[in-house]
Image: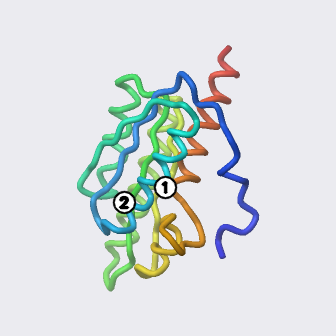
């Protein structure tokens, strides 16, 4: 399983004073809703304030994430689901979302928790969505990464 060796995302983290925006696509609703729920649980447990913004799909995640960060958010949790099909569309959207979100983090100097699932089939997404019976919770992991990175950046900047 891809999660082997992952840090403990369930470890308590103090997100007090942080404002985080979850930006989530609308494709593959069951999986995406699971990812959102995992991110929300993590942010609430940390004490961070958060809001949710929905976008049409993973391709739109970078521009909305950038706007959220430029508008004052301390971090973004970007959540999306891209399932491989029979055309190269999967590769283009996956690359655009990944490269775009990386650029957003570097351009703004603020963290983007990466929770975009790139999957061969829906079953892989169910396994990673933090749903009952799932093996992993990538929404929780992405939120934890965003919080931990925001805290590290705050400490480095004094």
Q: Is residue 14 left or right of residue 20?
A: right
Q: Nearer the viewer, residue 155 or 98?
A: 155
* SS for callout 1: strand
Whole-percent x and y of residue 73? 42, 28
From the viewer's perspective, tell me whether residue 80 is left or right of residue 138. Answer: left
Residue 3 x/y as whole percent: 66, 67
Q: CA distance from mark 1 to mark 2?
A: 12 Å
Residue for badge 2: 33
How many C-alpha atoms fall within 10 Å of the one at disc 1: few (<14), some, or many (≥20)? many
Q: Nearer the viewer, residue 39 or 124?
A: 39
Picture layout, residue 29 above or below residue 85: above
Can you identify the residue that label 1 sits on?
Answer: 115
Residue for point 26% across, 50% down: 55
Q: Earlier in the sequence, mark 1 or mark 2?
A: 2
Q: Position of residue 66 (x, y in %)?
A: 37, 35
Identified at 29% across, 65% down, the residue is: 27
Q: Image height check: is 156 above or below 107?
A: above
Q: Quadrant of the N terminus?
A: bottom right
Residue at (49, 34) in percent of width and height: 75
């Amino acid at each position: 399983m891809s999660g082997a060796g992952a840090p403990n995302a369930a470890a308590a983290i103090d997100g007090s004073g942080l404002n985080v925006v979850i930006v989530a696509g609308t494709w593959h609703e069951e999986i995406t809703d699971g990812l959102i729920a995992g991110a929300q649980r993590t942010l609430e447990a940390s004490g961070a304030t958060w809001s949710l913004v929905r976008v049409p799909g993973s391709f739109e995640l970078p521009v909305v994430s950038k706007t959220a960060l430029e508008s004052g958010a301390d971090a973004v949790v970007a959540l999306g689901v891209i399932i491989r099909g029979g055309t190269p569309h999967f590769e283009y959207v996956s690359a655009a979302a990944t490269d775009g979100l990386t650029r957003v983090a570097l351009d703004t100097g603020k963290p983007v928790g990466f929770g975009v699932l790139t999957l061969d089939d829906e079953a892989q997404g169910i396994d990673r969505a933090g749903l009952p019976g799932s093996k992993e919770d990538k929404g929780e992991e992405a939120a934890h990464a965003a919080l931990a990175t925001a805290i590290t950046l705050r400490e480095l900047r004094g």
